[in-house]
Image (cartoon, grey):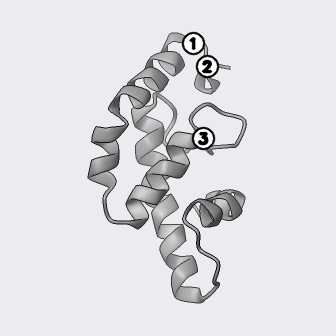
């Protein structure tokens, strides 16, 4: 999933306010994206290998999930954003989201 991270890295780094660069931090950020992307995609009714992008309504959810995972609080994200995730799931399963385009 390194390609997924490469595509979203600048936005994730800005959201997490990571202004430094070192190998350990980059590996941690890649792990965050690798954990969040498939889990959030499935909960939003998207394929597990979905590549989140800025033009999608799920983009803010993705960035916030990365923030929570980076803080070791992803379980809190699922609770705090349950309504928005449910709406995304319904939108994508009902046929008006990117999974059905």
Spatial separation of the CA atoms under disc 3 and disc 2: 17 Å
At mark 3, the secondary structure is: helix
Spatial separation of the CA atoms under disc 1 and disc 2: 5 Å
Specify the quadrant of the image occupied by residue 35. Answer: bottom left
At mark 2, the secondary structure is: helix
Q: Which mark is residue 100?
A: 2
Mark 2, other Cα within 10 Å: few <14 / some 14–19 / many ≥20: few
Mark 1 or 3, nearer chain start: 3
On the picture, is 38 further left or further right than 83? right
Visible residue check, residue 3: no
Residue at left 46%, top 47%?
A: 38
Question: Which percent across, then down, holds residue 30?
Answer: 54, 69
Mark 1, other Cα within 10 Å: few <14 / some 14–19 / many ≥20: few
Question: Do tag 1 and tag 2 residues touch (Cβ < 8 Å)?
Answer: yes
Q: Which residue is mark 1?
A: 95
Mark 3 or 2, nearer chain start: 3
């Amino acid at each position: 999933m390194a390609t997924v991270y490469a595509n979203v890295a600048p936005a994730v780094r800005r959201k997490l306010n990571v202004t430094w660069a070192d190998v350990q931090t980059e590996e941690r950020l890649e792990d965050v994206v690798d954990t969040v992307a498939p889990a959030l995609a499935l909960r939003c009714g998207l394929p597990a290998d979905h590549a989140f992008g800025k033009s999608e309504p799920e983009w803010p959810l993705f960035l916030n999930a990365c923030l929570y995972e980076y803080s070791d609080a992803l379980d809190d994200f699922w609770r705090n954003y349950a309504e928005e995730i449910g709406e995304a799931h319904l939108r994508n399963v009902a046929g008006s989201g990117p999974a059905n385009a």
